[in-house]
Amino acid sequence: ERRNSTPMVPRPATIDHVPPTKQRERQLERRARRAAAVRLQAVVRGIMARRDAKELWVAAAAANERAAVAKQRTIEARKSARLHRRHQRAATQMQSAIRQRRAWKTVEARRRLAAQKQQALDTVR
């Protein structure tokens, strides 16, 4: 059979018929004061913990924000670099095309000159 089967009887903390001595009174006071101090410390600790948690959360949020901004910046940098390369490629192609056209023109001019010279020689002959 369980020991707890008997109904709980509120037992007085101090024996009523013995008046507490001064020493005992002081001891109880000390104990109460210490308990109150401990409770207060617990409350303070809880507040501090909450504040620390909040600060940590804020710091984490700020770090996330910074990371997101950095990521966006790298994405944009990559995009601009790609564009820059494309533009450069286009420019070089254009340059080479211009150069080719110039070369072709000079070749054509030389050919034309040669033909004219030949014609002149033929007419003289």
Image (cartoon, grey):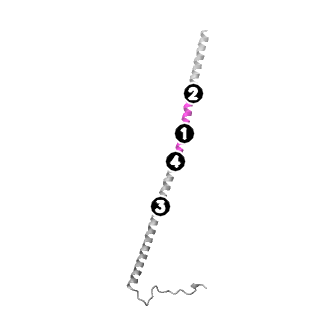
Q: Is 80 within the magenta?
A: yes
Name the kind of residue labelled 4 in the image. Thr
Residue 118 position in % (x across, y down): 60, 14
Task: Determine the secondary structure under disc 2.
Answer: helix
For residue 74, which numbered disc appears in the image? 4
- Seen from the viewer's position, the closer of residues 18 and 46 is 18
The answer for how far apart the CA atoms under marks 1 and 2 are is 24 Å
Q: Amino acid at mark 3?
A: Leu
Write down the quadrant of residue 109 in the picture: top right
Name the N-terminal-most of marks 3 and 2: 3
Q: Amino acid at mark 1?
A: Arg
Mark 4 / mark 2, whichever is N-terminal: 4
Q: Of callouts 1 and 3, which one flags the residue occurring earlier in the amino acid sequence?
A: 3
- Percent position of residue 125, x then y: 61, 9
The Cα atoms of the two marked residues, 1 and 3, are separated by: 43 Å
Magenta segment boundaries in residue numbering: 71-100
Mark with earlier residue (4, 1): 4
Among all residues in the image, which is located at the extreme bottom? 17
Distance of label 4 from label 3 (alpha carbons): 27 Å
Q: Which mark is residue 56?
A: 3
Which residue is label 1 attached to? 85
Q: Quadrant of the N terminus?
A: bottom right
Q: Are marks 3 and 2 in contact (CB under 8 Å)?
A: no
Question: Which residue bears the numbered disc 2?
Answer: 101
